[in-house]
Amino acid sequence: MHQALSTMPALTGNLETDENALAWAARDYGGTVHDRPTAVLRPADATDISTLIKHAREHDLAVVPRGQGHSTGGQSQALGGIVIDMTALSAIHEVGTDRVVVDAGAKWSDVLRATLPHGLTPPVLTDYLELTVGGTLSVGGLGGASHHHGAQTDNVISLDVVTPTGDVVTCSPDANRVVFDAVRAGRGRNGVITRATLRLVKAPETVAWHKLHYGTIGQLVADQRQLVTAGAFDYVEGQLKIREGEHVAELEAVSFAGRGDLGGLSFRETETQTVTYWEFVDRLAHGEPFLREAGLWESPHPWCNLLVPSAAVEDLLHHADRELGADLYSDFGLVLAYPLRTDRISTPLLRLPADDLVFLVAALRYAPTASPEIVSAMQEANGHFVSKTLAVGGTLYLDPL
Ligand SMILES: Cc1cc2nc3c(=O)[nH]c(=O)nc-3n(C[C@H](O)[C@H](O)[C@H](O)COP(=O)(O)OP(=O)(O)OC[C@H]3O[C@@H](n4cnc5c(N)ncnc54)[C@H](O)[C@@H]3O)c2cc1C
């Protein structure tokens, strides 16, 4: 046993060193990095985290918080160190008229289940809600509403944090600002968020959800630019995929108040449906069982997330469509392109390209299990995509700090 473990001060929660706990902490959604820790802490409270961090520091042992482990490159793993399972702290506390207080291990789906009965919602949600509040606040948290409201990290009122020296502090724009700016998008390396007070806005009951189909990537991008500049829709995203052999370029434009004006856009055809707000924000929950059934939920996901200047996005999307090819998409894979306005994002550690509009481009691929050569080929293709993006002033999103 590591000396740091045998001399660990008393903790209220559990410090686990059994094979199951270590194997669990050495896996993430990416399935390509497997760094085994020495122990896993399931904390009872912030004091446990503080005690652990102070002790680990004396023994030069890495401590890494983990939410749902939906990272794809080992960001929530700690080789030889200690992983803190933040899902042990997942309570939802008060829901106020404009804010909710939650433990950092709570999932966004649970936050919504608590706030929607009050007619309230966080202004920005990720596409998939089964991620923890601490996990997305540690990267930024971007979604189709970010062109209005910025990242999730821009919609935080205050945070309770255990700092890298083990101090327990509350931070906000007005108090302990240095800590506030270091932990938001801090990838868990600048402190552990234990509790968050999140901004809430009025939730619509129903939304008008338009799926617009395009003949070319150029038209898709031009319409995305037009829509986010005009600000006429509450949610705007785009995606490229291949389905039944056809290349598809699709834009989702969602209005929370009425249908929204689609005039002047150059889509070929459109499908529109009215659904409840919950049905819309929880839409990816329906995809998960299919992926599980196809064996693609547990298989490797060599994903690649980049922030691209608007001036370069069309060229890069053509590159993705051409070079990453059919093996990129299979029946489920896709390239997402969310347009963002940089004037809405103010989180210091969320590094953005220098442009008024930027796009989050996410190449999301599912590799068959037990095919290391396919995973390597996908990683190599990602490498080219990253180099090309960095060369035009793009930045990496979700990379380890
Ligand atoms: C299916 C899917 C859909 C996604 N959709 C989106 C999307 O629409 N928009 C978007 O922006 N991202 C999206 N992501 C990426 C996702 O937001 C990040 O990978 C996020 O970090 C995962 O959250 P998690 O709870 O699984 O965190 P983990 O993977 O467990 O941890 C992620 C990072 O956060 C740190 N961390 C975790 N908890 C804390 C804490 N309490 N305090 C400090 N640091 C902490 C970890 O150390 C690690 O560095 C998606 C990922 C998946 C798998």
Image (cartoon, helix red, strand yellow):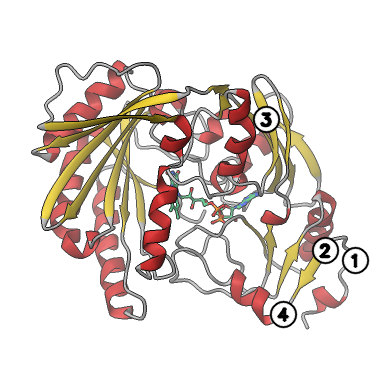
2 or 1: mark nearer the eye: 1
Q: Secondary structure at mark 4?
A: loop
For the residue pair 338 and 75, the one nearer the viewer reads as: 338
- Which image quadrant for residue 292? bottom left
- Residue marked by disc 2: 55
Q: Position of residue 136 (x, y in %)?
A: 54, 45
**Residue, x 31% and y 61% (percent of image)?**
365
Query: Within 10 Å of the Cα at label 4, are there few (<14), some (14-19), or many (20+) other Cα atoms?
Result: few
- Residue marked by disc 3: 100
Quadrant containing the N terminus in the rendered view: bottom right
Q: Position of residue 107 (x, y in %)?
A: 60, 46
Q: Position of residue 65 (x, y in %)?
A: 65, 57
Q: Which numbered dot is residue 9?
A: 1
Q: Position of residue 93 (x, y in %)?
A: 75, 36
What is the distance, in whole Å, between disc 2 and disc 1 at their CAs?
A: 8 Å
- Which image quadrant for residue 294? bottom left
Of the image marks 2 and 1, the number of the one nearer the N terminus: 1
Tell me which amino acid carries mark 2: His
Q: Which numbered dot is residue 18?
A: 4
Tell me which amino acid carries mark 1: Pro
What is the distance, in whole Å, between disc 1 and disc 4 at their CAs?
A: 19 Å
